[in-house]
Image: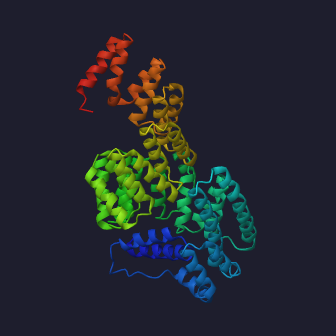
Amino acid sequence: MNPSELSYDLMSCHEHCEVRGFKKAAEWACGLMTCLPSSDSAPIRFPPKLATDFTLNFEQFHNRHYKRAKNLFYLGQYKRAAFYLKDLRQTSQEHRFLYYHSQFMAIETDRLNMCAEGENVFNTVKFILPKMNELLQELDKDMKKVKPDSWLLSIHSKILLKLNKVELARANLLQAVKMEPLNWPAWELLAPLIIDKHHLKSIELPNHWIRWFFLGNVHMKLQMFEEAYDLYFNVISKYFPNNAYVISQMALAQNELRDIEAAVDNFKKVRQIDPYRLDDMDAYSNALYVSQRKYDLASLAHEANEIEPFRYETCFCLANFYSLRGQHEKAATYFSRALKLDPTNVSAWILMGHEFMELKKTEDAIKAYRSAINLDRTDPRAWYGLGQLYEILKLPNISLDNYLEAHKLKPNDSRITIALADTYEKLEWFDQAITHYRRAGDAGLSRLVPLLERLGRYEEAKEAQTRLDECPVL
C-alpha cells in the first residue's frame, strides 16, 4: 500500500461522505489524506468510479433544489432539507440517502432538544419512537424498489439501532462494509456492536486497509488497550505519520493503560499539530486532572473556552479544572452543561456522579451513575462509582454487586480488585477477600498482610510481608 493508493481511497471516502452529509467522516478522511507522505513518482489520481458517478449524475447534482437541500442540511435545518429532497429522492442514490439522513437528523435533533429542556425519558421516548418507526417503514418500502446500496444500509442501521434492533443492524452493517469498504460511517457504527474478542474473530471482514481503524475502535471498546496501542503505533502510524487522530487514539489507549506521562506527551503533540482541534480534549483534561497538573489544566480549559465555549469538550475541561481546585458545585454545573450539549456522553455522567459524591448529594450521584450505565453497561467506571457510593452509605451487599460488575468488565484493574476484596472482608467472606487481594498483585499486599495476621495465618502473612518489603514503592 503506497501513499498514492491511500490518497485515492481517501479521496473516494471523502467525496462519498461529503455528498451524503457525513461531516465528521468526511473530515476524518481529509485529515488522513493531508498527513500522507508526498509521492512525486506516483501522482494522485481522482477515483474513476467516483468520477463516473459524478458524470452520470451531473444534472442531478447541480439541480438547484438539491444544492439548496444540501446547504440546508449543513446548516442543521434538517426538516427543510427533507422537504426539498422529497421529490428528488428517486433521481439518484445520493438524493435518496440525503433525504433519509435529513429525516433521521430532524428526529434526533428533536430528541436532543427535549433532553436539553429537561423532559423526562418516558416523554422523550414516547415522542421519538413512533417517528423513528414511521421513518423505518418508509425506508423499508423504498429499499425494496432499488438495488442494494451500502450507504442506504448505513442509515437503515442507524434507525434500527435507535429502535434497539441490534441484531438486524449488525447484519446490515456487515453487509454494508463488504459492499463498500470505504463506507467509514458503517465501520464506525459496527464497532460498538462487537460483543467480545471471540465475536470479533467470528465475523468476516473485507481485506481492506480501512479495517485497521475499525479494529482500533473495537479494541478500545472491548478494553483491549494494549492491542489498540500496538495497532496504532506499529501499523497505522507508519502509513499516517503525524496525524492528530492517530496520535490522539494512541494517547487514549495509553491513558487507559495508566501510562499517564506518555498519554500527556501525545496529547501535547496533538495540540502542536492541530491547536484548534477539540476532539478528545476531554480525555486530555482527565489525564491532566489525574496527574494533578493544575497549570496545564487551567491553560487547556482557557484555550478551549476561547476556541469554542459551547462544545461539550470545553465544558468538560472547565469542569475538571474546577474539580481539581475543589470547587465541586462549579464542576457539577459544567458537567451538566456538557450533558445538555451531548446527553449521550458516558464520561460526563460518571464524572458528574463523582462531583455529587463530593457534595454528598447521594440521590443525584446515583441518578448520574445509573444514567451512565443505561447508556453503556460495558463501562466499568460507572459500576465502580456506584460501588464506592454504596460503600460510603455502609451498604456492602449492594456495593459488592456493583464492584462485581466492574470487575467482570475490567478484571485486571487492581483498584477494582482491591475494592472488591475489601468489600468481601467487610462481609467477613475472608477466603474470597484473600483471593482477590492476591489477584491484585503487589498493590494488594498491604491489605493482605493484616488480614492474614488477623486470621492467625502467620506463615502466609510473613511470606506476604516479605514480598511487600521487596516491592518498589507503590
Q: Is residue 230 visible?
A: no
- Farthest residue in the top direction? 456
Image: 428 above or below 339: above
Q: Residue at x 61, y 63 (%)?
A: 108
How many badges with numbers are in the image?
Answer: 0
Q: Is residue 251 left or right of residue 77?
A: left
Quarter of image, res 144? bottom right
Q: Residue at x 31, y 50 (%)?
A: 288
Q: In the figure, is residue 64 to the left or right of 462?
A: right
Residue 426 point in image, percent of width and height: 45, 21
Kindly indicate the quadrant of the structure image that contains residue 265: bottom left
- Residue 397 appears in the figure: yes
Whether 366 is drawn above or below 126: the answer is above
Point out residue 376 in the picture as x, y percentages from the top left corner: 54, 47
Relative depth, front residue between 470 and 139: 139
Q: Quadrant of the N terminus?
A: bottom left
Q: How is the image coloured?
A: rainbow
Horizontal and vertical percent for residue 315? 42, 57
Depth check, front residue: 317 or 403: 317
- From the viewer's perspective, tell me whether residue 253 is left or right of residue 190: left
Residue 430, percent from left and from top = 45, 18
**Nearer to me, 411 or 293:** 293
Quadrant of image for the C terminus: top left
